[in-house]
Image (cartoon, rainbow, N blue to C red):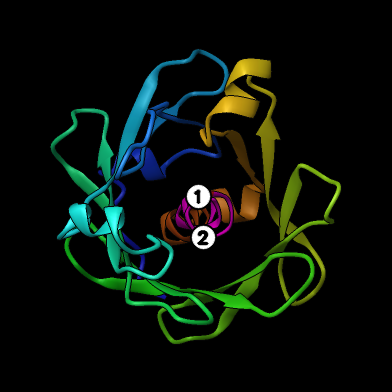
Amino acid sequence: MQEMPPALSLLNRSAFFIREHIGFMKLTDAYDILDPVTGAQLGLAKEEPQAAWLRLLIDKQILPTTVVVYEADGQTVALRIEKPFTFWRTRLSVYDGQGRFLGLLRTKFSLKRELIVEDANERPVGSFSGKWLSWTRELVDGSGQVIGTMDKKWSGLAKEFFTSADNYQLTLAPAAASQPSQVALLLAACLGYDLIFTEN
């Protein structure tokens, strides 16, 4: 897979805290991407559908959308995640800030809510899943090694029961963190997982 330039500082990290914005009857989703230790803003992810008003009439899980991931300046694009119309299994395409195709995220029929991560050549990077009663999701590669972990973080009784907003911590294994392209795919997988499986 072609590596991206190291200038994209957001993708030179091994851990992220992802905080979804709270909103009542919101039509689009947004996420702060933070340093899990210091709380510093690393980036921002914003859902930017072409016709958000359609979500008042049609289930947004069916409609196409784009999630744009920005650097901390709020202007520089680090990633784009594109979702087409979906009627059964979802397939997300991931692009870097220059529009280069990085890989695919696709759902697999599974009781574990499984998301398959593939590189730009559609070779498997790993399978992103977890047990039903666990708040931890692991990205496991073909050899069985865990290369990324997503933990849902408890955010308080009111937020958990009265909103659909979630918080996650994404931690990458050293081998994955050393490759910006894999950081990009795992960050996209974390956002994609929330978008596909937890948003209504």
Q: Nearer the viewer, residue 186 or 82?
A: 82
The x, y position of residue 58, in whole percent, is: 34, 64
- Whole-angstrom CA distance, mark 2 to mark 1, is 6 Å
Mark 1 closeness class: few <14, some 14–19, many ≥20 residues within 10 Å: few
Image point (63%, 40%), residue name: 171
Say whether residue 172 is magenta. Answer: no
Q: Which residues are magenta?
A: 188-198
Which quadrant is home to the N terminus?
bottom left
The x, y position of residue 25, in whole percent, is: 36, 36
Q: Identify the secondary structure beneath mark 2.
A: helix
Instruction: State the image quarter where residue 75 is shown.
Output: top left
Instruction: State the image quarter where residue 132 is shown.
Output: bottom right
Image vertical order of residue 126 relative to residue 124, above or below: above
Q: Which residue is mark 1?
A: 199
Does residue 110 appear to the left or right of 97 in the view shown?
A: right
Q: Identify the secondary structure beneath mark 1.
A: loop
Q: Which residue is mark 2?
A: 196
Image point (76%, 45%), residue name: 136
Say whether residue 196 is magenta. Answer: yes
The x, y position of residue 84, in whole percent, is: 32, 75
Asked whether disc 2 touches disc 1, contact meaning CB atoms under 8 Å apart, the reply is yes
Instruction: State the image quarter where residue 168 is shown.
Output: top right
Q: Nearer the viewer, residue 8 or 164?
A: 164
The x, y position of residue 150, in whole percent, is: 66, 44
Going by the numbered disc 2, the residue's amino acid type is Ile
Residue 55 shows up from this direction = yes
